[in-house]
Image (cartoon, grey):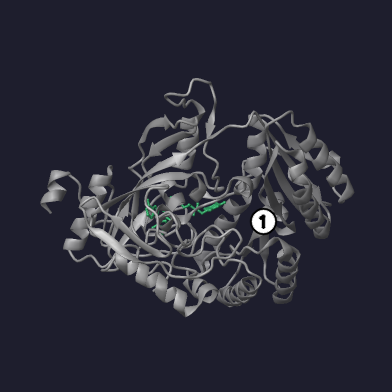
C-alpha cells in the first residue's frame, strides 16, 4: 500500500456501471476500479491487488470487445483508458518508421495523430499509417494487441500482430517484461525470458498446430517463435500490455473504394473468387479489402437509414447483396478500376448503382456504410435485452480456408432457413470470414441459435478453419476453443498461463476456466 501512496494511485470502491460491461452486453460485478496513467502505476496496482488477495484482476481497454473479456466477475478492474500518451517516433536504418504509444490510446486518436506525424530522421514528407482497422475505431491499441484485432484491410496487411515491434508487459506479480521483435525467441518450444527484476521465467510451449486461416483463437504458438507473439492475442491472460511500439507503413498515394450490389448471392460469391484470382495482375496496386453484406444487412440499412448517419442513399429494393472493395493505389490506379468494373459486369453487378470513391470525403461515406451494420445489430440486441435480460449477441467469428467459402455460406443459409431465425450476415469475406449475427427475440431462439453456432464451429474446424478469426475467445467462446484444440492442447495452454500467472489472478476465466 506504500507504493500506492507513492504513486498517488488507488482503487476506488464504487465502480460506475459503465465499467461492468463491454460490447458483448454481458454485465458483471467488481469490488473496485483504478485508472493508472503509467506502466509503473499499473505495476503498483497489480502488486496491491495481489497483496490484498483480490480474486481476479480484470484488464480493460475501451470495452469494445464482444467476447466479454473485459467484463469483471468480482475482484478489481484496472482500466487503461487514461494511459493514452503518444511518444515520439523513430526510424531504423532502412527507413522504416515506428511509434511508441500507451495502450489506452484509441485507434481513432492514433489515426488523427498520424495525419500530421513526421518521423525524426526521415526527410521525405511521407504520410504514415497503421493498417489494422477493426470497424470500431474507439478500440484501444492495447486491446487490439491483446485480441490481435484485424479488420477489412487485414486481407492485405495482416492483423495487429504483424504491426507490433515491441511491448512492455506487466506480469501478475507487478514485475515487468520488455520484449522486442527478434530479441527474445524460443528455441524450438523451450523458452526462457528475463523480467526487469532479474527473474527467469522458463518453460515449454504447448505443441499444437494452428489452422492456416485468419485466426485469433487462444495462444499463438510456433517453434522458435518470437516471445512477443505469445502476449499478442493472449487476451490479457498472461500480462497487461502497458506500452506498445507500432510499426507504421507509408500511406499509398491513392485509394479506390467501390460499393457494388448484386441481386443474387451466388453472383457475389463468383465475383469474390474471380477478383481474388485476378488481383495479383494489378500489382503494384494492392487489393486491400473485400467486405460483404447480405440481404438482412441491406434490409437493416434501409429500415434505419435515417438514424445511421448514412451519407449515401440506401440500397434500391432490387439489390439484395453488396460488396465493398478497397484498393491501395501504388501506381495510377487504372488497372484496379478496369478490373473491378469488368468483373462486375461479368458477374451480374451493375455500374449504374455502383459507388466509387477515390478521395478522403467519399471514402468516409463508404466506410460509414460499412460501420453502420454492426452498430445497428448491437443496438437491436441492447433493445431486446430489455425484455429478456439473458440475451447476448450471437455473432459468429468463424473463418475457413479459401476452398470452403462456398460450402460455409451454403451451410449458414441452409441452417438459418430451416431454423427460421432472424439474422444478418456481413464481414470480411475476402478472408472467408463473415459474421453471422443471429437476432433472437426470446430465450428459445437464443438457445436454438447457440446450438447452430456450435454445430457450425464443429464443421468449420473439420474443414481446417478457426472458431475465432478476430474477436477472440473471452468468456463467451471457451467451449469453442476446447472444441477446436481438444483437451491436451487446452491443458498445455493452462500450464503456460500458470508459468506467467501462478495465482491465476489476471483475467482469469478467459480462454479457459
Ligand atoms: C461495432 C464493432 C465492430 C467491431 N469490429 C471489429 C473488427 O472488425 N475486427 C476486430 O478484430 N474486432 C472488432 N470489434 C471488437 C473489438 O473492437 C476488438 O476486439 C478490440 O480489439 C477490443 O479493444 P478494446 O480496447 O475495446 O478492448 P477491451 O474490450 O477493453 O478488452 C478486450 C480484451 O483484451 C483485454 N485487454 C484490453 N486491453 C489490454 C491490455 N492493454 N493488456 C492486456 N489485455 C488487455 C481485456 O481484458 C479483454 O480480455 C468490433 C467491436 C464493435 C463493437
Residue 480: image x %, image y %? 53, 72
Left/right of residue 280 with respect to residue 441 in the rendered view: right
SS type, badge 1: strand
307 displayed left or right of 501: right
Rendered position, 50 above or below 353: below
The residue at 80%/59% (across/down) is 265
Residue name at image x 66 percent, y 35 percent: 363
Compare residues 157 and 453 and report the one nearer the observer. Answer: 157
Q: Position of residue 105 (x, y in %)?
A: 40, 41
Give how far across and how far down residue 492 sits, in percent.
41, 73
Q: Which residue is mark 1?
A: 426
Q: Is residue 52 visible?
A: yes
Q: Is residue 1 above or below residue 111?
A: below
Crowding at label 1, few (<14), some or many (≥20) Cα neighbours within 10 Å? many
Q: In this rendered view, identify the residue nearer to me: 502 or 70.
A: 502
In the rendered image, the quadrant that contains the N terminus is: bottom left
410 is higher (above) or lower (below) than 147: below
Q: Write the residue at 46% across / 79% down.
A: 487
Specify whether 255 is left or right of 316. Answer: left
Most extreme residue toward the front is 187
Residue at the far left: name it: 2
Task: Determine which quarter of the picture holds residue 58.
Answer: bottom left
Residue 30 visible? The answer is: no
For residue 293, what is the image quadrant? bottom right
Amino acid at each position: 500500500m506504500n507504493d500506492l501512496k507513492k504513486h498517488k494511485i488507488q482503487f476506488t470502491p464504487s465502480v460506475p456501471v459503465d465499467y461492468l460491461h463491454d460490447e458483448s452486453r454481458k454485465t458483471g460485478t467488481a469490488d473496485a476500479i483504478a485508472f493508472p496513467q503509467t506502466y509503473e502505476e499499473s505495476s503498483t496496482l497489480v502488486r496491491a491487488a495481489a497483496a490484498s488477495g483480490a480474486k481476479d484482476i480484470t484488464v480493460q481497454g475501451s470495452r469494445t470487445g464482444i467476447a466479454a473479456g473485459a467484463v469483471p466477475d468480482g475482484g478489481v478492474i484496472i482500466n487503461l483508458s487514461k494511459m493514452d500518451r503518444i511518444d515520439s517516433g523513430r526510424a531504423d536504418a532502412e527507413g522504416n518508421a515506428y511509434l511508441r504509444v500507451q495502450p489506452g490510446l484509441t485507434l481513432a486518436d492514433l489515426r488523427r495523430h498520424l495525419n500530421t506525424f513526421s518521423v525524426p530522421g526521415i526527410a521525405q514528407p511521407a504520410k504514415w499509417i497503421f493498417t489494422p482497422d477493426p470497424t470500431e475505431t474507439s478500440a484501444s491499441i492495447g486491446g487490439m494487441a491483446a485480441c490481435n484485432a484485424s479488420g477489412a484491410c487485414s486481407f492485405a496487411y495482416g492483423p495487429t500482430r504483424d504491426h507490433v515491434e515491441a511491448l512492455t508487459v506487466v506480469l501478475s506479480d507487478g514485475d515487468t517484461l520488455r520484449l522486442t521483435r527478434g530479441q527474445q525467441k524460443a528455441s524450438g518450444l523451450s523458452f526462457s525470458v528475463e523480467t526487469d527484476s532479474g527473474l527467469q521465467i522458463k518453460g515449454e510451449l504447448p505443441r499444437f498446430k494452428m489452422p492456416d486461416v485468419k485466426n485469433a483463437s487462444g495462444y499463438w504458438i510456433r517453434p522458435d517463435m518470437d516471445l512477443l507473439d505469445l502476449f499478442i492475442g493472449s487476451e490479457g491472460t498472461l500480462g497487461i500490455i502497458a506500452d506498445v511500439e507500432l510499426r507504421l507503413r507509408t500511406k499509398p498515394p491513392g485509394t479506390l473504394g467501390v460499393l457494388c450490389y448484386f441481386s443474387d448471392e451466388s453472383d457475389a460469391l463468383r465475383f469474390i473468387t474471380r477478383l481474388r484470382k485476378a488481383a495479383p495482375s494489378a500489382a503494384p496496386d494492392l487489393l486491400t479489402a473485400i467486405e460483404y453484406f447480405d440481404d438482412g444487412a441491406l434490409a437493416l440499412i434501409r429500415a434505419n437509414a435515417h438514424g445511421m448517419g448514412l451519407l449515401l442513399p440506401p440500397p434500391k429494393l432490387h439489390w439484395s447483396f453488396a460488396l465493398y472493395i478497397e484498393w491501395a493505389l501504388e501506381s495510377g490506379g487504372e488497372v484496379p478500376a478496369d478490373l473491378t468494373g469488368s468483373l462486375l459486369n461479368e458477374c451480374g453487378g451493375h455500374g449504374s448503382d455502383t459507388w466509387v470513391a477515390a478521395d478522403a470525403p467519399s471514402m468516409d461515406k463508404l466506410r460509414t456504410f460499412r460501420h453502420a451494420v454492426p452498430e445497428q445489430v448491437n443496438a437491436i440486441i441492447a433493445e431486446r435485452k430489455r425484455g429478456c435480460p439473458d440475451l447476448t449477441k450471437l455473432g459468429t467469428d468463424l473463418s475457413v480456408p479459401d476452398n470452403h467459402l462456398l460450402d460455409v455460406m451454403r451451410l449458414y443459409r441452409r441452417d438459418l432457413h430451416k431454423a427460421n431465425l432472424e439474422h444478418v450476415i456481413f464481414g470480411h469475406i475476402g478472408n472467408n470470414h463473415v459474421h453471422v449475427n443471429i437476432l433472437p427475440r426470446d430465450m428459445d431462439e437464443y438457445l436454438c441459435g447457440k446450438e447452430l453456432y456450435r454445430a457450425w464451429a464443429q464443421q468449420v474446424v473439420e474443414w481446417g478453419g478457426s472458431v475465432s478469426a478476430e474477436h477472440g475467445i473471452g468468456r463467451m467462446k471457451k467451449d469453442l476453443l476446447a472444441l477446436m484444440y481438444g483437451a491436451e492442447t487446452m491443458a498445455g495452454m493452462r500450464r503456460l498461463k500458470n508459468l506467467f500467472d501462478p495465482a491465476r489472478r489476471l483475467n482469469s476465466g478467459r480462454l479457459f476456466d
